Image (cartoon, rainbow, N blue to C red):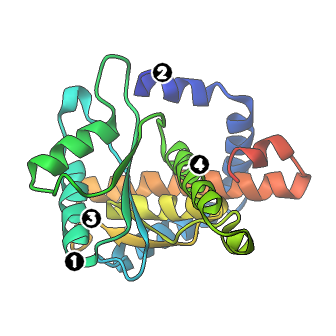
C-alpha cells in the first residue's frame, strides 16, 4: 500500500480532484471569502456542539490516524480512550476500526486494536478491521462495504418473507473522531448514505493556535468537498459523483 505522502500526491494529480478544487476556489474568491467563512463557522459549530457519548448508534466507526511505526499521537490517544468509554457505557453491537497504512507497517486499524486491548478492552469485543483506506472518504466507503456485507449475510439467514426489511439496510453508526475532524466525517457519511451520529473524542473543544489551524484546514477541506459535489450534481458529472456517493 502506498505511503500517506504518495496517496496525497496521487490525489493532487487527479483531474477530478483538481476540477473540484478550482471550482471551490473560484466560488470562494467570487464571494470575497464569505463562502469559506461560512464553512469555517459550520466546522467550528460542529466541533463545539458534538456530544461525547452516542445516543443510539448500533455500530461505532473509530477513525484511525497516522501512526508511523505504531507511534500514536495525542489525537489518536483521545479517540482510543473515548472508544473504551463508549464500549463501557453504551455497548454497541460492533466497533469498526478504520485506517490503512504503508507497506511493511501495521495499519491504523491494527494499531488501534493493539492499543485498545492494551488499555483493557475485553478481547471478546466484536471488532472489525478495515485496513485498506488512506483517507476519510475511503474509510467510510470501505466501512459501508463491510456493513453491507454483514447485511447480506443476515438476509441469507432470514426467512424469505423478512428479506425486504433488511435489503440494502445499514445500521445507524456513531462516527468517533477528534472534534476538528467531525464535520468532514459527517459530510462524507451523509453523502454515502449513512444514518449517523457524532461522538467527539475530547470532552470539549480546546482553543489554541494548533486547534485553530486544524479547524481552518478542515473548513477548507469541507468547502472543497461540498462545493465540488454540488457542482458535479449541477453539471451532471457522473464520474465525480461516483467518487463521493
Q: Which mark is residue 201?
A: 3
Residue 209 seen in render: no
Of the residues tagged 4 and 3, which is closer to the observer? 4
237 to the left or right of 23: right
Q: Which mark is residue 89?
A: 1
User: What is the spatial separation of the Cα atoms under label 1 and label 3, in whole angstroms?
Assistant: 14 Å
Q: Give the labeled residue for mark 2.
A: 6
196 to the left or right of 205: right
Whether the residues at callouts 2 and 1 have beta carbons within 8 Å, the answer is no
User: What is the spatial separation of the Cα atoms under label 1 and label 4, in whole angstroms?
Assistant: 27 Å
143 to the left or right of 85: right
Crowd rating for badge 3 (residues with CA inside 10 Å; few <14, some 14–19, many 20+): many
- Secondary element under disc 2, as helix, strand or loop, is helix
Q: Position of residue 200 (x, y in %)?
A: 32, 68
Q: Position of residue 165 (x, y in %)?
A: 69, 75
First in residue order: circle 2 vs circle 1: 2
- Secondary element under disc 4, as helix, strand or loop, is helix
First in residue order: circle 1 vs circle 3: 1
Q: Quadrant of residue 234?
A: bottom right
First in residue order: circle 1 vs circle 4: 1
First in residue order: circle 4 vs circle 3: 4
Q: Position of residue 41 (x, y in %)?
A: 48, 72
First in residue order: circle 2 vs circle 3: 2
Residue 13 seen in render: yes
Q: Which mark is residue 145?
A: 4
User: What is the spatial separation of the Cα atoms under label 2 and label 3, in whole angstroms?
Assistant: 28 Å
Residue drawn 71% across the image and 42% down it? 22
Of the residues tagged 2 and 3, which is closer to the observer? 3
Image quarter of the C terminus:
bottom right
220 to the left or right of 94: right
User: What is the spatial separation of the Cα atoms under label 4 and label 3, in whole angstroms?
Assistant: 25 Å
Q: Quadrant of residue 84?
A: bottom left
Amino acid at each position: 500500500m502506498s505511503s500517506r505522502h504518495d496517496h496525497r500526491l496521487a490525489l493532487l494529480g487527479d483531474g477530478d480532484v483538481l476540477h473540484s478544487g478550482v471550482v471551490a476556489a473560484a466560488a470562494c474568491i467570487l464571494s470575497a471569502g464569505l463562502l469559506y467563512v461560512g464553512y469555517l463557522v459550520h466546522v467550528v459549530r460542529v466541533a463545539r456542539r458534538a456530544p461525547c457519548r452516542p445516543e443510539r448508534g448500533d455500530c461505532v466507526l473509530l477513525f484511525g490516524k497516522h501512526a508511523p511505526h505504531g507511534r500514536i499521537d495525542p489525537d489518536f490517544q483521545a479517540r482510543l480512550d473515548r472508544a473504551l468509554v463508549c464500549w463501557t457505557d453504551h455497548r454497541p453491537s460492533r466497533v469498526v476500526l478504520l485506517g490503512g497504512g504503508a507497506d511493511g507497517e501495521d495499519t491504523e486499524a491494527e494499531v488501534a486494536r493493539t492499543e485498545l486491548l492494551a488499555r483493557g478492552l475485553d478481547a471478546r469485543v466484536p471488532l472489525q478491521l478495515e485496513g485498506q483506506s488512506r483517507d476519510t472518504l475511503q474509510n467510510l466507503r470501505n466501512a459501508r462495504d463491510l456493513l453491507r456485507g454483514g447485511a447480506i449475510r443476515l438476509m441469507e439467514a432470514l426467512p424469505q418473507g423478512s428479506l425486504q426489511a433488511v435489503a440494502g439496510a445499514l445500521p445507524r453508526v456513531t462516527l468517533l473522531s477528534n472534534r476538528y475532524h467531525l464535520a468532514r466525517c459527517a459530510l462524507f457519511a451523509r453523502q454515502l448514505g449513512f444514518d449517523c451520529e457524532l461522538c467527539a473524542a475530547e470532552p470539549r473543544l480546546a482553543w489554541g493556535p494548533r486547534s485553530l489551524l486544524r479547524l481552518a484546514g478542515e473548513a477548507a477541506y469541507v468547502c472543497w468537498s461540498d462545493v465540488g459535489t454540488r457542482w458535479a450534481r449541477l453539471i451532471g458529472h457522473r464520474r465525480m459523483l461516483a467518487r463521493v456517493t
